[in-house]
Image (cartoon, coloured by chain):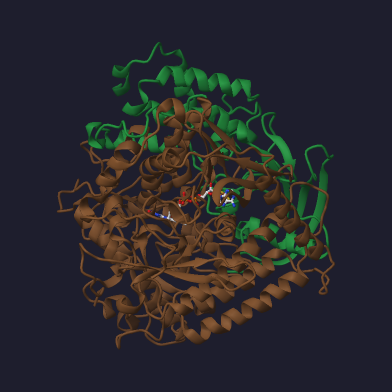
Amino acid sequence: MSRSIALTLRLWRQACPEAPGGFETHRLEAVSTDLSLLEALDQLNERLIAVGQRPVGFEHDCREGICGACGFLVNGQAHGPRAATTVCQLYLREFEDGATLTLEPFRARAFAPLQDLAVERTALDRILEAGGYCSVNTGSAPEANALLVGREQAARAFDAASCIGCGACVASCRNASASLFTAAKLAHLGQLPQGQPERSRRAQAMVQRMAAEGFGDCSSHLECEAACPKQISADWISWMQRELRRQGDNPAAARS
Amino acid sequence: MSAVLDPRIPGGPVATAWQRCREELPLISPSNKRRLRLLVVGSGLAGASAAAALAEQGYRVRLITYHDSPRRAHSVAAQGGINAARNDANDGDSVERLFRDTVRGGDFRAREAGCHRLAEISGAIIDHCVAQGVPFAREYGGTLATRSFGGAQVSRTFYARGQTGQQLLYGATQALMRQVAAGRVELLSRRDMLELITVDGVARGVVCRHQLSGELEAFTAHAVLLASGGYSNVYYLSTNAVKSNASAILAAYRRGAFLANPCFTQIHPTCIPSGDPGQSKLTLMSESLRNDGRLWLPLRAGDDRPPAAIPEPERDYFLERQYPAYGNMVPRDVASRRAQELCLAGRGVGPGGRSVYLDLAEAIEREGRPAIETRYGNLLEMYERISGEDPYATPLRIYPAPHYTMGGLWVDYQLMSTVPGLFVLGEANFSEHGANRLGASALMQGLADGYFIAPATVTAWLAGAPQPSVEADHPACRGALAAVTERIAALRARGSGGGSGGGRRPVDAFHRELGALMIEACGISRSGPALSRALVELETLRAAFASELALADHGTPIDPELEKALRLEDFVQLAELMLRDALSRQESCGAHFREEHQTPEGEALRDDARFGHIAAWEHVPGGEPRCHLEPLQFTAITPSTRSYR
Ligand SMILES: Cc1cc2nc3c(=O)[nH]c(=O)nc-3n(C[C@H](O)[C@H](O)[C@H](O)COP(=O)(O)OP(=O)(O)OC[C@H]3O[C@@H](n4cnc5c(N)ncnc54)[C@H](O)[C@@H]3O)c2cc1C
Ligand code: FES
């Protein structure tokens, strides 16, 4: 049932990367619980704009939990309290009337601040650039059914491949590691026959790049798994660690 | 017929047209390709695939996107699947059949040759995506699985759970990142394209605004490819991403690229209805739900009992009643229209009477909850998150929402617009879907354009018309930069309180108003009087936007409100074209339903003699847009009337 609630928002405000940041408090009276938290921010912004003030900056686009653009901390939790949910899909019905929400940007060495709740996450793309692909040129592919992939195997690869690159794993890790992100891509490609030829090289290159971008190591606290809106399993991180010990690229190993 | 439009369709039989065309296209040697620079705008399926494929051939490519990362393009949201005529299900599918379904689905408002080419290429797309590691659904034996989608009689849709678009996009953007690593693609992210640069009438670059630094930049190239997606956000609420926009295609339009069939827009029947005025977007529920869900409304208007309390005899399964043969599987436009009609007649349910039930109860009883969970688990979870209702216990509520735009920049058979050197790919072009697109065919088209067609035809253009190099200090670049600087300054001047209204209304308020106007006049159902009225109302809106906009300058280069204001200006210009186009197309075809042109049963009444054409609109600076017609010929298929009764 739809209701109206009042909310207090404690927001991190920082006009630009060089500017000092700090918290600012705004109160929203009578917002419908049928709105998402981002829509509540939209309403706040319309109010700020009408009186000539700078609206709150935050990242978003699809608003349906799939593009990975949104992401900030709600009361210290990446994407807020609801499991398996991006912040754009977080509806106000999750909150009590009169609640106070503290909204802060993701904080990590590799994520430079941009404005208010927005940070730069392109370091994740550079990890992919280091090897997160199968090297195949357009036009050279064999007939699709020439490669048989078992149903379970395809499903496991899919599970890992469903990472949306939002950075919640990094933001929730005390070492600001991108291990879950990196492992997910390695596990996606490393479990499929198509990914075998470059399997070891890919793992080495992506992990090296992760470190070079300023992400930390994994110390197995598993906060990343809890924060992941796509519920990607932290088991892939141990899988990745085994992967790094593999020698050479051996197609026969694929089916193991 | 207009002398200006030459679609360059190869003569002779449609079935061999692409093969013959391709064999005659001129080539460029790999060493010469390295000297040629290309600009691609957009990193969705169309843009990412084109950029990757062209870079693989040796071209030096720059890719512009407003996103921080190419992986976030809205193709990522496509759920259902991608069509390919591979006959994997051994159910009689073939290139010929997919070709015919596409032409018929588009209600005979697309080019035969283009539709045939799509069907021909469809199989190779699947091969390539599999080779990239796209984790498509598989049968137990390890072969690719397919499903029947959107009422197709064959099972030709390939899918990756409910996230096909995401997985195809990751395949394409990973191919792109490989080229970035190889130094052949330079990513120019977080840029809004605002202007096209032409030299002697040929497309040679674009002007962008960098979203972080606020700087305006000119980029030049030997050819420009636009793949900036669709314009459903002209309706404000749609299934598109909140920042999806029409600015790139409008910039091209203002520089001489014609916009074709702008009024052909698709409204998808199964979306989560809007609840609150503050809602910012509509979310699609995959069409596949109609395979198992039954649409119904209470027989009696105003019946506000909870759905479970309404006994069978008092329910109206309206699609099954009106279309016994197809039932709930009628095409999207038909389902949307019937649902809207009943809601307008006061029979709708939910807030404001703006939804109909989609009931899974029978399927759950027949197959058990676990089976339904496996099939639609993710979707139903999403529904529950957004609506707060449990779809296993009570019927889902759905309502039609703007979803896809068949219209777009006019292109010839080689995907080149009326501005030489400007190619348009994916949803941004008007392409092969005619007046209505089949489910799972947009992903196919975007990837066909990007992986296979553009690499051949862009090469042919550059081989046939070698372009001198143009640097960023060329007068054309300086002129284009100055035009954008002036445009932004003008918006700013009126937005910082200089306007007579005091400048207190945020951009979104205008966008909501535009959306309401467009969905009412140019949505599921259109009529002459309503369209004419909307043109007048649009002028009022334009005037208000000029005097009441709030757009203060806070001295920070990151300025999302400025980005929105620029987009809205373009949407308003596009809206006018859509209304004019809908007004002048005095027939009903596909998704374009003119109330004056219907059969006694309320079905669309096409008029091939007067409207068997593509309408392409030319920008006339300071005047009214001019319409050019490209007549359509059908040699392989005889136009017939769609019938689902
Ligand atoms: C929710 C949903 C579900 C769908 N499901 C299916 C399906 O199951 N099957 C199917 O076949 N089709 C489906 N479609 C349709 C299909 O997804 C789209 O038509 C297709 O993905 C569009 O791809 P594109 O590459 O043309 O554009 P997009 O993926 O929209 O990419 C546009 C790109 O252009 C960039 N861009 C846009 N404007 C600018 C600008 N001014 N400056 C700089 N960059 C710009 C963006 O950053 C982005 O990178 C669905 C669509 C939606 C919305
Ligand atoms: S806005 Fe796309 S995932 Fe949240």
* Residue A113: quadrant of the picture: top right
Q: Is B636 placed left or right of B2 in the picture?
A: left
Q: Colour of chain A?
A: green
In the image shown, does B31 or A227 lie closer to the viewer?
A: B31
* Residue B24: quadrant of the picture: top left
Q: Position of residue B495 (x, y in %)?
A: 79, 64
Q: Is B607 placed left or right of B339 in the picture?
A: left
Q: Residue at x 68, y 69 (%)?
A: B509
In the image shown, does B287 or B470 lie closer to the viewer?
A: B470
Q: Position of residue A235 (x, y in %)?
A: 46, 28
In the image as oriented, which residue stretches furthest toward the top?
A247
The reply to whether residue B545 is in sight is yes
Q: Colour of chain B?
A: brown
* Residue A33: quadrant of the picture: bottom right
Q: Is residue B618 above or below residue A129?
A: below
Q: Is residue B199 above or below residue B299?
A: above
In the image shown, does B315 or B501 lie closer to the viewer?
A: B501
Q: Position of residue B635 (x, y in %)?
A: 21, 64
Q: Quadrant of the C terminus of chain A?
A: top left
Q: Quadrant of the N terminus of chain A?
A: bottom right
Q: Position of residue B186 (x, y in %)?
A: 57, 33
Q: Residue at x 44, y 23 (%)?
A: A239
In the image shown, does A153 or B332 lie closer to the viewer?
A: B332
Q: Is B475 placed left or right of A202 in the picture?
A: right
Q: How many marks?
A: 0
Q: Residue at x 56, y 39 (%)?
A: B221
The reply to whether residue A219 is in sight is no
